Amino acid sequence: MEQKKFSVLLKVIITGAVICCVLVYALIVPEVGKSLVEAGGEEFAPYYLPWYLFVLGTALPIAAAAVLAWLIAVNIGRDRSFSRENAKYLSVIAILAAADAAYFFIGNLVLLFLGMNHPGLLLASLLPVFAGAAIAVVAAALSHYALKGAKLQEENDLTI
């Protein structure tokens, strides 16, 4: 596959992922929160806004990572797949994913200790925490290999 076609395909996937995230945060998260409040009764109603704001906070690193992924796709389209710039972007994506996973887990613990969470929800939150950790590890590995590739390419460019 040509670099340009691959870049366009990556941009389409990134756009689709962003649209899915917007739909989840705009439509699904509020409805799930409301249904949990309805199921739990009036005693849980005051917890809706803190929970909603907490969950919205997880969207910020995702948005930043999407921008960085877009920049990586642009570089791939310019035939700069293995560059120090892409390695740095991937490294930042790894940090964002790890920070988002940690924020979500610690936030769930804090809300549990404040009496605004249920142990079952804390256990259910381990799935997105694991997904964030997995993304962090994959992005860090890709960053490592992109940097190694960039160094090899620089050495190759200096060779006659």
Image (cartoon, rainbow, N blue to C red):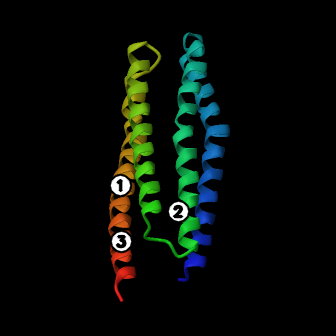
Residue at numbered disc 1: 140
Residue at disc 1, secondary structure: helix
Give the farthest residue toward the top: 43
In the depicted structure, whether residue 1 falls above or below residue 71:
below
Residue type pointed to by label 3: Gly
Give whichever of 125, 69 is nearer the camera. Answer: 69
Residue at numbered disc 2: 72
Question: In the figure, is residue 25 to the left or right of 149?
Answer: right
| Disc marking residue 54 | none
Residue at disc 3, secondary structure: helix
- Cα distance between the residues tagged 1 and 2: 14 Å
Corner quadrant of residue 6: bottom right
In the depicted structure, whether residue 23 falls above or below residue 109:
below
Give the total of numbered labels. 3
Which corner quadrant holds the C terminus? Answer: bottom left
Residue at disc 2, secondary structure: helix
Residue at numbered disc 3: 149
- Cα distance between the residues tagged 3 and 2: 15 Å
Say whether disc 1 or disc 3 marks the residue closer to the N-terminus.
Answer: 1
Residue type pointed to by label 2: Ile
